[in-house]
Amino acid sequence: MRIAIVGGTGTLGKHVVAELSERGHEVRALSRSGEYPVDLTTGEGLAKAVAGCDVVVDASNATAKHAAQVLVAGSRRLLDAEQEAAVGHHVAVSIVGCDQVPVGYYRVKVDQEHVVEQGPVPWSIAQATQFHELARAMLAAAGKFRILPVPSIELQTIAATEVARAIADLAEGPPRRSRIRIGGPQICTARQLATTWRDVTGRRALLLPVPLPPGKLGRALRERGLTTADPDIRGKITWADWLRAQEASGS
């Protein structure tokens, strides 16, 4: 199949590109620069990039400030281009708990899902829990100051490579017109994640408890809003094992 990956150079997208390429598909990596340059905010390049494609995987991302313009309005532009190109399957990547945790970026992801559901192209939506990569980046950034803020939340991090395999499976199959949930192998507290990072990396940093905000947001986080106890697909690589592998490889 010919498959286009929007956000094909990003944290997840690059792994989806690699996975589908290894499976023998003709894969196009769509990004703001590269062989197939596209701009979701204007629609520039989309028609050419998706022409002749059987499937489009949308693994795009955006900063919170521009999220609605890229992910919601951009999805409409992308789906219109797919309809013109007779694409048969649109796979959207979303986040577990985006409909439960009331923060701005997650509200945008909910709106994006609705655009996909109501759009003209047969679809599947893959909701994933937070990536190991994101947890590591946040801890490393905070660790530079030797203080690790630790909110009283539970997370279920997963390796992006495992999410990519699940998305590749989804892209190879028929449109589901439903959501699948992809979750990490363990539900851990933020303190456990931070302690493991500190132990594996050998970094010295103080764990600083951070209270949850009041109201709906705090309640959603206390109720494990970012996790899924019974995912459709469960990863196998734990946070500790993934982190050790990254440290050993110098990545």
Image (cartoon, grey):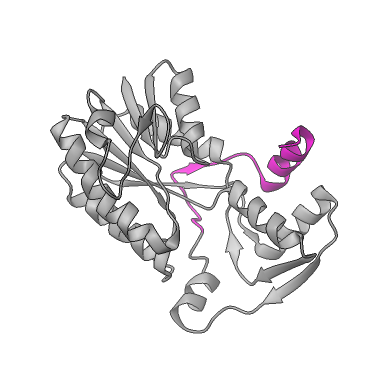
Q: Which quadrant of the view contains residue 171?
A: top left
Q: Which residue is drawn at the image coordinates 64% and 40% (left, top)?
A: 237
Q: Position of residue 250 (x, y in %)?
A: 76, 36
Q: Which residue is drawn at the image coordinates 22% and 49% (left, top)?
A: 76
User: Which quarter of the image is occupied by the C terminus?
Assistant: top right
Residue numbers of the magenta segment: 227-251
* Residue 246 among those drawn in magenta: yes
Above or below, 56 against 100 in this view is above
Q: Position of residue 236 (x, y in %)?
A: 60, 39
The answer to whether residue 121 of the structure is visible from this angle is no
Q: Nearer the viewer, residue 34 or 103?
A: 34
Q: Which residue is drawn at the image coordinates 54% and 80% (left, top)?
A: 213
Above or below, 52 against 68 in this view is above
Q: Nearer the viewer, residue 181 or 37?
A: 37
Q: Position of residue 202 (x, y in %)?
A: 85, 51
User: What is the count of numbered marks?
Assistant: 0
Above or below, 125 against 52 in this view is below
The answer to whether residue 33 of the structure is visible from this angle is yes
Q: Spot the residue most to the top.
A: 24
User: Which quarter of the image is occupied by the N terminus?
Assistant: top left
* Residue 51 among those drawn in magenta: no
Q: Is residue 247 left or right of residue 27?
A: right
Q: Is residue 237 left or right of residue 2?
A: right
